[in-house]
Amino acid sequence: MIFPFGSYLRLARAGFVLARAGVFRDIDPTVLPPAARLPLAIAKFIARRDAGPSLARLPDAFSELGPSYVKLGQFLATRPDVVGPAVVLALERLQDRMPAFPRAVAIATIEAAFDRKIDQLFVQFGEPVAAASIAQVHRGKVRDAQGERDVAVKVLRPGVERRFKRDLGDMYVAAHFAEYWFAEARRLRLVEVVDTLARTVKMEMDFRLEAAAASEFGENVERDHDFRVPGIDWDRTAKDVLTLEWIDGVPLSDTDRLIAAGFDLPDLGRIVIQSFLRHAMRDGFFHADMHQGNLFVDREGRIAAVDFGIMGRLAFNERRFLAEIIYGFITRDYRRVAEVHFEAGYVPRIHKVEDFAQAIRAIGEPIHSRTADQISMAKLLTLLFEITAIFDMKTRTELVLLQKTMVVVEGVGRRLDPKLDMWSTAEPVVRDWIEQNLGLLGRVQDGARTASLLSKVAANLPRALLRAENIIAKFEDIAEDGLDLSETALQQIGAAQARAQRFGHAALWVIAVLVAIWLLR
């Protein structure tokens, strides 16, 4: 086994940078396992005295570590179940935090992607207007049969794929280490978190896939009168380059300009909330990075979204789960909320529906006793995550992206309208979906889906029976030949694994001691 010295050294540097920024300073050691308390004490000793509030320094620390860690921070902002809603809100400030690379490098990337000179593709190609961890955006102008039009050109950052591959390997090492030593890390499935990050980054680095997501999203919202998606210029889109319609609007983050332009801020907040819920429940396909930097208001008062690298999907069962959970909280039907969790298989059957309903009531009642501007979706999700631990609920990767987006969307809505009532705003969209899909019309549609499924099963039955027969025959062959795994072999495997683990633990302590000695010189 090759021990990953490089990974541990890079992880040690990352830990040092985070510790110096004071990120770990406010962590209560009593909530950690005993083995983690000494490293936490070292981290607090390392922290700069002028570091300021720990969460305030978090975005700067990730930015210092480079593009891979900026993306990790942005991704962790999609996992409130892992880092908590407060950290999510801090990490949301990581948008467009990377330095831009030269315009000449971007031009070289574009010319290599299309094997054409830049002036054959664009009438104008300007300096970068935004730079993120994976790519940066330039404003350009193209001329075609429809005339001249402005476009946004997204160009992949040079060398970013090699850097991400190395850093993802380091993150896998850290996740495996955490899951081996800490039960809570296993419940949160940290290795699976890194798996999801790796898949997300791989897709984000192929701009053809982002273009396809934007195209699908645009078709879904085509008839929405208050939400729009920029069109894709497929002739100028490749793996490393994405060209799409330039959005000429006011950023949702610039409230002063919105007010000066005469827009109704509370109405914009309502549109953001209801649009997100409509996309998630009606279409099962939603923008999962709806922070205010990715949202604009055009001249017609429509919300326009950009940056489609992170999108979320929900199957019909997850959409039903979302609708019934929200509606159950709105109507205070906690028994139904609990039943939906059990029907979806999210709560192990060793628990009782009545007990889970009681826990849900403990979350819902305090919320309903507060005024609209005191009700927080982030607070609700924090309490829900505490309940998931009590009732042995595993992390559901298909829902955490949805949960994170709800926290962010609520934050955007409340910046536009501090007294925004999340529940009354959500109620018409949720009620409409329930009437359409779970009422009489919904039962008819369920019947049609069931009939279609049964016909597919019947058509595939002969093939399935033949496959089963082949599998049984292979098992019979194995049984006849015998499968021998001796006790000696098992002991040797176990001993090798134990040696590797002891070596890894010793190396970590050596690194920690060396860092401490270096600081004390």
Image (cartoon, rainbow, N blue to C red):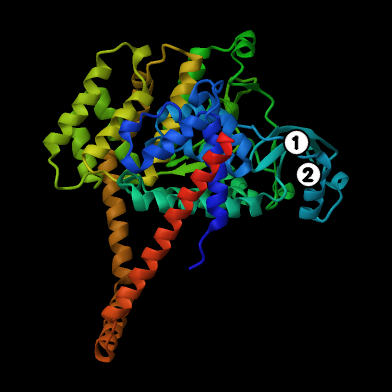
From the viewer's perspective, tell me whether residue 236 is left or right of residue 37.
right
Res. 91 mark: none
Q: Which residue is disc 2 drawn over?
A: 106
Which of the marked residues, 1 or 2, is nearer the chain's N terminus?
A: 2
From the viewer's perspective, tell me whether residue 230 is left or right of residue 484.
right
Q: Quadrant of residue 424?
A: top left
Residue 83 position in % (x across, y down): 41, 35
How far is mark 1 from mark 2, CA to CA? 9 Å
**Between tags 1 and 2, which lies in front?**
2
On the question of residue 241 being in view, the answer is yes
Q: Residue type at mark 1?
A: His
Residue 90 position in % (x across, y down): 50, 27
Residue located farthest toward the front when viewing the structure as drawn = 521
Q: Residue type at mark 2?
A: Ala
Q: Quadrant of the C terminus?
A: top right
From the viewer's perspective, tell me whether residue 370 is left or right of residue 79.
left
Q: Is residue 47 above or below residue 79?
A: above
Question: 183 or 474, which lies in front?
Answer: 183
On the question of residue 275 being in view, the answer is no
Q: Are marks 1 and 2 in contact (CB under 8 Å)?
A: yes
Q: Which residue is disc 1 drawn over?
A: 138
Question: 35 or 90, which lies in front?
Answer: 35
Q: Is residue 225 above or below residue 288?
A: above
Residue 254 position in % (x across, y down): 61, 17
The residue under the point 55% across, 32% down is: 20
Circle 1 crowding by C-alpha within 10 Å: few under 14, some 14–19, many from 20:
some
